Image: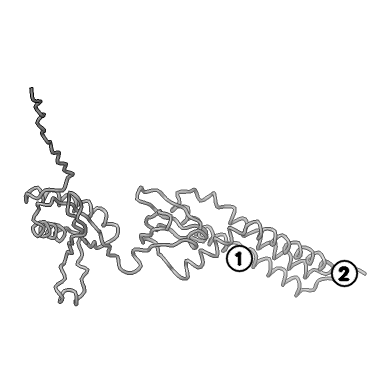
Amino acid sequence: MQPALMDMKQMLLIAVILVLAVILSHFARRAIGRYWLHSARRMNVHPSNYRIFKNGASVVIFTLALIVVLHLLPGLEKVGTTLLASAGILSVIIGLAAQQTFGNLISGIFIFIYKPFKVGEYVELNNGKSGVVEDINLRFTIIRNGENRRMIIPNTLVSNVVIINSDLKNTRVCNFITVSVDYDTDIGKAIKVIGKIVVAHADFADNRTQSMMEGGISIVPVRVTSLENFSVTLSVEAWCRADEASYPMKCDILLAIKTGFDEAGIRMASPVRKILFEEKEEAQQCP
């Protein structure tokens, strides 16, 4: 028995499916092209390296359209079912082979949803790496470190590490600075010199609450924290307005304290050893 001839409705439906496949492939290629062009600029990679993703999207769309068309053609339903089953098996194989890739995609989606950090924020990972987030895509998070190098980290790794986001809430950071002075030093005078230096810095931030101000808490707490053999250790809490400025601020304050102590005649501590010589008279023997 010969297959039944297609009627006009089936032919029209097949034509519509093919046209939709062409239109969908066109828009999918454009969307993927724009996305990867943006990522390529961030990663300094030529956009043509990602052409395989556009071609892959077209192949998937036209394959699905072909399967649907074969199901509509009289006598070719089994061929379409076979292709559909083969495509299912192939998708399982590809899924197992690209498990890590899909994991990165899912992690990237969760990063977009929950936003633990955003582009432009300074973050620090628990492995000691830190920098400014430059780009977040569905596969990688790109972080620019202090050496202006790009760290391209898979999203699955980003999702499984502890991240310190200094820009998430309060950007202020406390610098703990220790200074050792000689035992003959006027401690009160040294504390005043340190306080003036810290407050005068351009990046200094007053982190006291209203109750702390009313309680008379110093704007720059300086405390004696240790009495060593040759020195008195002073600890300073110098609050900085932003995390990225904390290290330069600490360096500036250390230099200014050394200069200020020299001008004020305050001696920095240094190891001192006292050597005692004991003279013994030789016993004189009697003749």
| Number of residues whose C-alpha sits closer than 10 Å to that of mark 1, classed few (under 14), some (14–19) or many (20 or more) | some
Instruction: Locate residue 95, reporting x and y percent.
Output: 65, 60
Q: Residue at x 19, y 61 (%)?
A: 204
* Horizontal side of residue 15 vs 45, given as left or right: right
Label 1 SS:
helix
Q: Earlier in the sequence, mark 1 or mark 2?
A: 2
Instruction: Locate residue 161, reporting x and y percent.
Output: 47, 61
Q: Nearer the viewer, residue 31 or 86?
A: 86
Instruction: Locate residue 83, reporting x and y percent.
Output: 76, 63
- The numbered mark at residue 140 is none
Quarter holding the C terminus is top left
Q: Does the residue at mark 1 contact the one at mark 2 (Cβ under 8 Å)?
A: no
Note whether 6 is above or below 259 in the view shown: below
| Number of residues whose C-alpha sits closer than 10 Å to that of mark 2, classed few (under 14), some (14–19) or many (20 or more) | few
Which residue is the extreme one toward the right?
Answer: 1
Q: Read off the residue under disc 2.
A: 3
Q: Nearer the viewer, residue 195 or 166?
A: 195
Note whether 148 is above or below 132 in the view shown: above
Quarter holding the N terminus is bottom right
Q: Read off the residue under disc 1.
A: 24
Q: Kindly identify the amino acid type of the residue bearing the numbered disc 1.
A: Leu
Q: Kindly identify the amino acid type of the residue bearing the numbered disc 2.
A: Pro
Q: Residue at x 16, y 48 (%)?
A: 269
Q: Residue at x 6, y 51 (%)?
A: 264
What colour scheme governs how the chains and residues are painted in the rendered image of this protein?
Answer: one colour
Q: CA distance from mark 1 to mark 2?
A: 31 Å
Q: Nearer the viewer, residue 271 or 38?
A: 271
* Horizontal side of residue 155 vs 202, given as left or right: right
